[in-house]
Image (tube, grey):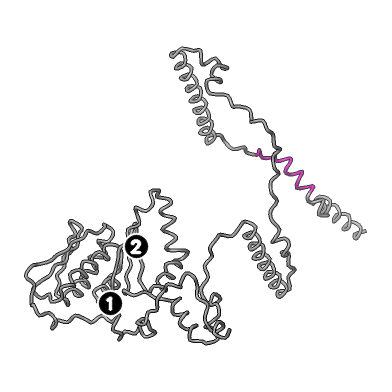
Amino acid sequence: MAEDETTPIVNKNKRHRKEKPWDTDDIDQPLDIYWKVETFKQEDNIGGTFIEESSFATLFPKYREKYLKESWGTVTRALESHGVACTLDLIHGSMSVRTTRKTWDPYIILKARDMIKLLARGVTVVQAVKILEDSMACDIIKIGGLVRNKERFVKRRQRIIGPDGSTLKAIELLTGCYVLVQGSTVSVMGPFKALKEELMIRRELAKDPKLATESWDRFLPRFRKKHLSTSDKTAKKNERLAEHAEKQAEVATMNGEPSTVTAESSSKPSEKPKKKVYTPFPPAQLPRKVDLQMESGEYFLKAGEKEARIAAARKEKQAETTKKRQSERAQAFVAPVEEAEAPVEEKRKKKRKADTAEGEAPSKKKKKHKEVTIANESE
């Protein structure tokens, strides 16, 4: 019984897997013999100069002409250090590389070919120069022929990039590679060996004796195998709306304002339209064009009469449009309505009324009042 308890439970899918004694923790070390790439130096070329000249050429699009013309000096200096000559032909829109008498690395011409291919596909010069290193490799994946429909192709290409480039950044972080989506191709650059995240987690868990006989599913990354149902999506949406309403209410209480939004009102679904009454009978058939012509009598007219009828309708329509345009143009010449000025007598009457309303007596009455007061004083 004690032996059965100590023996770990082996998964059925992994019972035939054999142990890999060479796959140890230090396999990812740069000094390990399995993954170390020794640099090829000029002293290692025992044969000397090459007998034949090797060359490669590639075309580039028109929009890359200005960038390549400005940065071609950097490309030339990077290739001259390896003894490779390069040419930029702006007339034919092509780039070419070839070996010279100074070339000592037999594989560098293939690296230079990959470099000009990456430059043609939109990769920057700073990034494309890294392909000349021995530990770097590249691949240009053509994705244009995977889907025939152009709109569907654009949507699927957008999946690689993701919102604000998040998916592309995640791919770069997980694989340790540089990825560029341009047009109908995907350019990839990186080391030969990719990351092994899940394997690293399993090794760390195996070191712990307490977890040696337990299930490790709770530590490993989980992937969703099926899409959520409509009810689950609605429930999650309502939860998010309720949380948002609670946050708004908290902010309103802190500011001393009454909160109008509640969790019930935010999570309440919109009113659905009323369902139509089901009838087993199909809807009435719409009349055909021929039926409408037979009702109006147009169907029984001759070809000349039909043309004359169409021409008359066209002329009538033209007359209506011309009449409408003429009326619109004539509105610019219509004089605006002007108010007639009141006569002098009416102006005086209005002025007198205004004076009496203010409590001021007329000037004649004032003069009479002065004369009476002078006469009384004299007496």
Q: Position of residue 54 (x, y in %)?
A: 12, 66
Nearest the camera: 199 or 310? 199
Q: Secondary structure at mark 2?
A: strand
* Quadrant including the N terminus: bottom right
* For residue 304, side relative to residue 136 (left or right): right
Residue at 8% x, 77% y is 47
Residue at 88% x, 58% y is 373
The stretch in magenta equals 339-353
Examine the structure image and report whether residue 122 is included in the region drawn in magenta: no
Q: Position of residue 271 (x, y in %)?
A: 70, 51
Callout 2: 10 Å neighbours few (<14), some, many (20+)? some
Q: Amino acid at mark 2?
A: Val
Nearest the camera: 200 or 291? 200
Specify the farthest residue to the front: 1
Which quadrant would residue 194 be assigned to in this image? bottom left
Which of pointers 1 and 2 lies earlier in the amino acid sequence?
Answer: 1
Residue at 54% x, 84% y is 3
* Quadrant including the C terminus: bottom right
Examine the structure image and report whether residue 347 is included in the region drawn in magenta: yes
Q: Amino acid at mark 1?
A: Ser
Nearest the camera: 268 or 374? 268
Nearest the camera: 131 or 280? 280
> Disc 1 marks which residue?
135
Using the image, determine if residue 237 lies above or below residue 281: below
Which secondary structure dominates the residues rendered in magenta?
helix
Residue at 18% x, 61% y is 57
* For residue 103, side relative to residue 229 (left or right): left
> Disc 2 marks which residue?
186
Measured Cα–Cα span from mark 1 to mark 2: 20 Å
- The disc placed on residue 343 is none
